Structures are given as structure tokens and as C-alpha cells.
Image: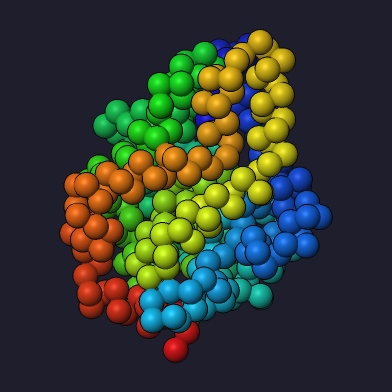
């Protein structure tokens, strides 16, 4: 989400921030650790993995190949789309991005697959995170934004603002209405908006919080080459540790940001269960339906 101004005056991503999904998806070490990192084996899609196999409520495992989380699908190769359809029986795609992001890199159409646009960030009412995602910041403005602790604030924003809560409530309605096949959700990098959605799903399915945090942090395995390259680039420009650490959170997953949001949830709502019930509209009946649908018997 770090932006620069080109000769036309329009904002553009700094090249160093772009995600090299060939590196991220094709890394040999990731292939060796396929099960540990839960990769779904897509070449052109970053951070593409699943939730299947985690232990949820009543010691029941999450069903394999039903719940998929990824980065944007715009660069998916034909073989990736074929794999999603034939291997996972993909039924629904949920896009958490802003309209700007979707217009810039639209999802491919996949025959027989329903697409839902469920933006998590409020573009209409001055969300700073939405402004960053839309390319409204120059590089200097973006770095200042990040150094202000904005990434941690963004997690609190998507956890606590009514707009974002309604988006995640709709996300759960789609999960509950799914009858068969996989559901895939994504944002741009598949780590923040999609990552928080995954946190909510894993929580609702009864996965332990420590495991949830470990799953969240897996993003750093997928994007480690990008994180390293970004750090080298910023240091080559004379930026110090504070700036590098702030910018690193745009390319990777900082557990402390998620923990801050989870702490706010516990403080304001009493527990994750109460938050899911009151803000995501997932009561006991809906939670049981979700578990019966996505946990093994």
C-alpha cells in the first residue's frame, strides 16, 4: 500500500512493494512444507492456502478443501482456475477489496462460480485504510501513515466499525448458505482483510487462539522474498529501523496488530463469542450450523 507519483502525476505502487507470486507460490521450501503451510498450489496467486485440517470444537477437524483464502485472483493462470474448479470444486468467491482495487485488477470469471463483492473498508466515508488501498497517498504520505501505527489501527477499524462488521456478517451468511464446494475469500495480498476474515472463521469453528495466530503469521512464509527485498530497498534509500519496520507491515503479517484488535474485541464485547453473536450476527444456532457444515463428524 505504499504509493509514488509517476510522470503523469497519478499514484502508483512502488515496484518493490509488488508481490512476486512466482517467488511466493513457487518457492521450493514452501512446496516441501505444503501441509504445514496449507498451500493450495496456485502458481499465479499469492498467499493461496486453506483452513482445512485445523482442530476445532469438540476435537473435530476442519474439512479439507472447503475454506480457501488467497490474495487477488487477477493474475491467476488458466491452470490455477482449472485447479480451483476441478480439485476444490470452487463454488463461491468473496472479494473484500475496494471498488478501486477491483477495477484495477478484476477477478477472472470462472464458469459456474458465484462472485460476491463484499468491501470491508468504507470508501465513501473517509476511511484512511480505504484511501491507502485506493492509491490516494504519495510514497512520503504513505510512509508517514504507516509510521503513525496505522496498520494496527486498521485492524481495530475492521474489527469495530459498523461498515466492516456488516461486511463480515455478510461473509458468514455466504458461508452458511453454501451447500457444496469450496468458498474462497480474498483481498489484495490475502493477509489483512482476508486474514481477519479467517481469524473470525477459525474462532467460530472453535480453533484455539494460539493456532489462529500461527495461521495468520504464515503469510510471512509466502511473502518472505518480498519482505526482504522491500527492507533492502528502503535501507538503500537511507531509511532507518523505524521506517523499515513500519513499511514491513505492508508486505507481511505483524501478529501484534492482530493481537491489538483481538484485545479491543475482548475489552469492548467481553469475548470473541459475544462479538460474533452481537456484531457478526452469529448466534449459537448459526454457529452450530457453521460447525456442522465445515467440521468433520
Residue placed furthest toward the bottom: 297
Q: Position of residue 28 (x, y in %)?
A: 81, 55
Residue positioned 53% across, 55% down in the render: 214
Q: How is the structure coloured here? A: rainbow
Q: Position of residue 261 (x, y in %)?
A: 34, 44
Q: Quadrant of residue 177?
A: bottom left
Q: Could you say which is closer to the camera, residue 103 or residue 169?
A: 169
Q: Quadrant of the C terminus?
A: bottom left
The residue furthest right is 28
Q: Is residue 117 above or below residue 147?
A: below
**Name of the residue lying farthest toward the front:** 210
Position of residue 176 measured from the top left corner of the image (x, y, whole percent): 35, 73
Location of residue 150 by image quarter: top left
Residue 143 percent across, percent down from the top left: 51, 19
Residue 41 or residue 257, whichever sits in front: 257
Residue 71 vs 58, above or below: the answer is above
What residue is at 68 percent from the left and 41 percent from the top? Answer: 224
Height in image: 194 above or below 276? above
Residue 80 visible? The answer is: no
For the point 39% across and 35% down, which residue is it? 152
Residue 149 showing in the rendered view? yes
Amino acid at each position: 500500500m505504499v504509493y509514488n507519483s509517476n510522470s503523469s502525476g497519478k499514484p502508483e505502487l512502488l515496484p518493490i512493494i509488488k508481490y512476486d507470486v512466482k517467488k511466493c507460490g513457487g518457492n521450493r521450501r514452501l512446496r516441501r512444507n505444503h501441509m504445514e503451510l496449507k498451500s493450495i498450489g496456485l502458481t499465479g496467486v499469492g498467499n493461496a492456502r486453506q483452513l482445512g485440517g485445523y482442530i476445532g470444537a469438540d476435537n473435530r477437524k476442519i474439512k479439507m478443501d472447503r475454506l480457501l483464502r488467497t490474495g487477488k485472483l487477477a493474475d491467476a493462470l488458466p491452470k490455477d482456475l482449472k485447479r480451483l474448479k476441478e480439485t476444490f470444486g470452487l463454488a463461491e468467491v468473496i472479494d473484500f477489496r475496494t471498488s478501486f482495487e477491483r477495477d484495477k485488477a478484476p477477478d477472472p470469471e470462472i464458469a459456474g462460480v458465484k462472485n460476491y463483492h463484499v468491501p470491508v473498508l468504507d470508501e465513501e466515508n473517509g476511511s484512511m485504510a480505504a484511501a491507502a488501498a485506493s492509491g490516494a497517498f504519495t510514497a512520503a504520505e504513505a510512509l508517514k501513515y504507516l509510521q503513525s501505527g496505522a496498520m494496527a489501527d486498521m485492524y481495530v477499524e475492521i474489527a469495530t466499525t459498523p461498515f466492516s462488521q456488516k461486511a463480515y456478517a455478510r461473509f458468514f451468511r455466504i458461508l452458511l448458505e453454501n451447500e457444496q464446494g469450496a468458498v474462497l475469500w480474498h483481498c489484495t495480498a490475502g493477509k489483512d482483510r482476508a486474514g481477519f476474515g479467517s481469524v473470525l472463521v477459525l474462532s467460530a469453528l472453535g480453533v484455539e487462539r494460539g493456532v489462529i495466530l500461527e495461521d495468520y503469521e504464515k503469510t510471512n512464509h509466502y511473502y518472505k522474498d518480498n519482505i526482504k527485498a522491500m527492507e533492502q530497498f528502503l535501507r538503500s534509500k537511507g531509511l532507518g529501523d523505524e521506517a523499515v519496520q513500519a513499511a514491513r507491515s505492508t508486505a507481511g503479517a505483524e501478529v501484534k496488530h492482530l493481537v491489538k484488535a483481538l484485545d479491543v474485541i475482548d475489552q469492548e464485547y467481553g469475548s470473541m463469542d459475544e462479538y460474533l453473536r452481537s456484531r457478526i450476527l452469529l448466534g449459537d444456532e448459526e454457529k452450530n450450523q457453521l460447525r456442522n457444515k465445515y467440521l468433520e463428524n
